Amino acid sequence: MSFSILSLLIFLPVLGGLCLLGVSRENEKNVKVLALIISLLEFVFTLPLWFGFDKTTHHMQFVERHSWISLFNIEYYLGLDGISILFVMLSALVTILCVLVSWNSIQTKVKEFFIALLLLEGAMIGVFCALDFFLFYIFWEAMLIPMFLLIGVWGGPNRIYAATKFFLFTLVGSLLMLVGIITLYIKGGNTFDILALAAMDFPLSLQLILFWGFFAAFAVKVPMWPVHTWLPDAHTEAPAAGSVVLAAILIKMGAYGFLRFSMPILPDATTAMMMPMLVLSLIGIVYGGVICLAQTDLKRLIAYSSVSHMGFVTLGIFALNTQSVEGGILQMINHGVVTGALFLGIGMVYERTHTRKISDYGGLATNMPVFASFFLLFTLASVGLPGTNGFIGEFLILLGSFMTRPWVALVASSGLIIGAWYMLWLYQRIFFNPVNSKWNKIKELELREIVAFMPMVILIFWIGLFPNTMLDFMHVSVAHLLEQVTGNPEGVASGVQLAVTNSLEAAGHGVQHVPQISH
Amino acid sequence: MNMPFTMPPLGPIMPEILLVCIGLILIIVDLLYPRNRELLSQLTLLACIGLIALLFNQKPASTFGNMFIVDPYSIFFKVICLLGLLMTTLMSGQYLTIEKIRHGEYYSLMTFSVVGMMIMASAADLIVIYLGLELMALSVYCLVGLLKDDFRSNEAAVKYFLMGGFSSAILLFGISLLYGMTGTTDLAGIAKYCSEAGIMKNPALLTGFALVLSGFCFKVGAAPFHFWTPDIYQGAPTSMTAFMSVAPKAAGFAVFGRFLMTGFPELHEQWGTIIAVIALLSMGVGNIVALSQTNIKRMLAYSSIAHAGYALLGLLAGTSEGYSATMTYLFIYGFMNMGAFAIVILLCSAGNRRESLEDYKGLAKSNPMAALLMLIFMFSLTGIPPTAGFIGKFYLLKAALAAGYTYTVICAVIFSAISAYFYLRLVRYMYMDDPQEEFVAQYSPGLTAALALSTIGVIGMGILPGSFLNLAARSLIGF
C-alpha cells in the first residue's frame, strides 16, 4: 500500500502533541479544542482500517517496511492483523473520551497534560502496529514516560508513590524482556522480525527461558497475580483520563504481548506452560474478586475488579482453543469499554464530590437519575448480563476453557458470581441506600459527559447483540495463531481429542509442532 | 656506539602537536590581553572544530617505532575527548563569570589535558600510555582546585592529587613488572613474547597485569577504585566536573581497551571474569549509593561510577562488537552527561549554587524548558527509549550477551532498574513538587549552544542511530 496509514496514525498524535507546545499557556481553551480535534482526526483516520481490512487472510495488512538501523538489521516494520486492528481503533476512541473527561477536571498545567496524553496515544498505537521486536520495545518503553507523568503530576494525594511504583514494576519486567529479546535475536539469526522469528524452531529449553523472560514484562502489564500490586495504586491515584487509558489500553498490552510474541514465537513453551498460566489466571480471578469485597475506595475496587477480569482474559488466551482465544481478545475489548466507562463515570462523579470513599456516597440515584442509569448499564455489562458485551466474552472464555479443562471453567465461573456480588453491592451503596444530604445539590450530567458515554453504550450493545462484527476480524488470524501454537487451527479442543488429532495428522501429513501437553 | 638519527614522521602526531601549539598560544594571548576570556574560549572552540575536521581526514599510520598509532579506534576516542572539550568550553563562560574565576590558564590547562588524552588514545606502548596519562592528570589536578576560596575545591584538588599519584605509582609498578617479565614495553611485543615463551600463567606477570588493571580502573572510576570520585566531583568547579566525567573517562577506556585487546588477548578468559566482577561492583555501588544522595553533583558522580560499569560490559565481551559498543556508549554518555551538567550550571547563580536536589523542586513551573531538557537527560541516563541512552545500553547488553555473559547482563539490567529510582526522583522533584523560590534561569549563548548540541545528540542518536553506529563499528575494522 503506497499510502502509509499506520505511520500517519502513530505520528499524527505525536506531531500534534508537539504542535501544542507552540500554543500559549494562557489560552487553555485553544489547547483543549486542538487536542480534541487531533484525537477526532486520529479516529477518523482509523476508519479506513475498519473498512479496508481483508478478513479472509491472516497475513499482515497495511504493511510498511523500511530499514532503520542497518547495523543490527532493525527495521521500521508495521502491519496489522485481526488480533491488533481492534486495539488500534479502541485506542483512538478511548483517547477522544479521555480528552472529553479531562475538559474541566484538569486545572493545572493543562497544556502539558494534553501533550502527554497525545504522545501516549502515539506510542500505544505504535505498540499495536510494530512487527519488529526492537521497534515494539521502543514504543513499549516510550509509553512509560507520559504515563509516569500523567499519574505523577495530575494524580491524587499519593500520586508520587503510585507513579514511581508503576514505573519501577514495569521497567524491571521490560528490562528482563529486553534480555530475552536480545537472546532471541542472537539465537534466531540476527533478526527482530516477529514473523520470521515465529517461523523458526527453537529448542524447548531456550523457549522456556525466553517464555519467562517475556512473562516478566507481559504479566506485570496485564497484571497477573502475583505482580498485580502496582495496578490498584496506579489506578487509584491517576487522574480520570489516566485511569481510563490504563484500564482500557495499557493493561491490554500485556495480553496482546502474549498473543503476539510468546505464543507464536515460543509455541512449545506455551503449551508446556499452559497449566501454570491457567492456574495463575484462576488465582487472579478469584483473588481479585474476593479482595474487591473488602474495598472501601471506589477506584480501588474497580482496579481490583480489573485484576479479576484480566484473569479471565489470560485464562482464555492460555486455554488455547478457538472459542477461548477469541473470547479472550473480545473480552479485552469489552473490559476496555466497560472499565473505561466505569472510570469515566467515577471521574465525573469525583469531579463533583472529591471523594472516593464508598461510604461517603448514598442515594445518588435520587439526584442524578441519568448518571445512575448509565452506571447501572456499565455495572451490568461488567457483571456479564446477557445482551451486553461482557456476557459474550465471558461465555466464550468459559466455553473454551471447559473444552480444554472442565474444572478450570468451574473455578473460573465462581469469579462471575463474586463479580456480580461486589459490583451490585457497590451499586447499591452508591446509588441506593439512604440519601446522603451532602449531595443534595449535586449536578446532573452535562451534555459533554453524556456524549462521552455514548460510544461506550453503543459498543456495549453492539458487541452484546452482534458479536460477529468483531469476531469476524479475528477468525482467520486466531486460527493461524492456534495452528502455530498447537498445530491445529482449532487449538486444544480437549486433552483426549487433541492427542488423537495429532497422531492422525502426524501420521498423515507431517506436523511441524507436536505439542507436549501432559494429561 | 653511533646510531644515525632519523626523524620519525610527524604526520600522524600532527593533531597533538597543533593542540600543544594552541595551548601555548592561549597562554601568550592571555599575557597580551589579560582578562579577555571571551577571546580565549573562542580560540579553543575554533581549535576543537578544526582538529575534529583534521582527525576525520587522518589516515591510519604509526610513528616513533610503533609507539604511537593512529587508527580509526584512536580517532574515535580523540573525537570524543575533543567534543568534551568543545562542550565544556561552551558552557564554561557563564560558570566562570558566576564563580568569578579569572584565570587565563583555565583554557590552556584543559587543552593540555586533552593533548594527554589524545596521546593515550594513540599509545601502543606502556611508557607512552603513562606519559599521556600524567599529562592529562596533572592538568586536571590544577583545574579541580581552581576555586581557590572554596575549601571543598581545595580538598578535592589535594585528594585527587594524592590518590592520583598513588594510582600512578601502582600503575608504574605494574608496568615495571611487565617489562621485567617480557623485556619490552610495547603492547604487541608483550603479547608476542608471552605467547611464544608460554609465561601466561606466571605469577609475576599476572601481578603486573593486575596492578596495571587497577591503575586503569582508578582512572575510569570503576569500583572498588572509585572512592575519589564523589568528593572530587562535588568539590571541583561544575564545568570541570562535566569535563572530568566525560573526556578523561573516555581516554581511560581507550587505553584500557587497547591494553586488553593488544596486550593480553590470550588471557581473555581470566580478565573477562575479573572485569565482569568490577563491572557489576561498579553498577552496584554506583546505583545503590546514588539512591541516598542529596547533592546533584554527588549523585551524578555515583551515576558516573555506574556508567563506567556499563561501559565495561563491552570490554569484558572481548569482541570487536563489544569494543564498538563501549565506544558508542561513551560517545552517547558524553552527550547526555554534558547536558545534565549544563543544566546544573544553568541553575547556578552568584551566591547560590543550587546544587542540592531540593533546589530542583518545582523547576517545571519556574523554568519549564530547563526541566524538560533535564527530563530528557535523566531518561536517557536511565536508558529509556527513544533516547540515545537506550541505544547505547542496548548495544552493550547485546555485545555482552553474544559473548555469553548472560548472568552479568541480567544483573546489569536489574541494577539499571534500580538506577531508575534516583533519576526519576529528580524528575519527580522537578514536575511533581512546588517551587521553593522564584528563580528564572539565565541562558548565555554558549550554554544554550551546549544544551542544544547535547539535546540534538541525545534525541537524534536515539531516533536515527543508524549511520552513527555504522561509524563506530567501522572504527574497529582491522583492530
Image: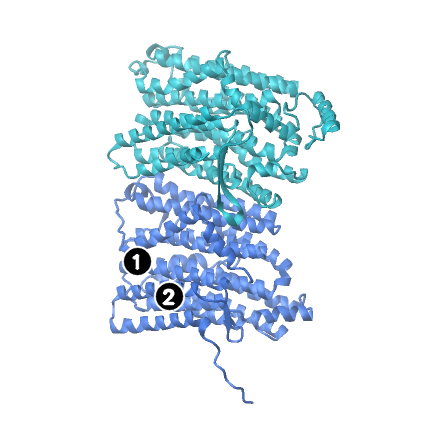
Chain colours: A cyan, B blue
Examine the rendered structure and indicate whether residue A361 appears above or below residue B52: above
On screen, residue A82 versus residue B444, left or right, reads right
Disc 1: host chain: B
Say which of marks 1 and 2 sits in front. Answer: 2
Mark linked to residue A9: none
**Amino acid type at image mark 2:** Met
How far separated are the C-alphas under marks 1 and 2? 15 Å
The percent coordinates of residue B395 (x first, y second) are 52, 50
The percent coordinates of residue A123 (x first, y second) are 43, 36
Closer to the camera, A140 or A128? A128
**Amino acid type at image mark 1:** Tyr
* Contact (Cβ within 8 Å) of mark 1 with mark 2: no
Classify 10 Å Cα crowding around label 1: few (below 14), some (14-19), many (20 and above). many
Circle 2 SS class: helix
Do we see residue B291 in this rendering?
A: no
Q: Earlier in the sequence, mark 1 or mark 2?
A: 1
Closer to the camera, B357 or B326? B326
Which residue, given by chain and number where applicable, does mark 1 sit on? B95
Which residue, given by chain and number where applicable, does mark 2 sit on? B110
The percent coordinates of residue A496 (x first, y second) are 72, 21
Q: Residue furthest right?
A: A507
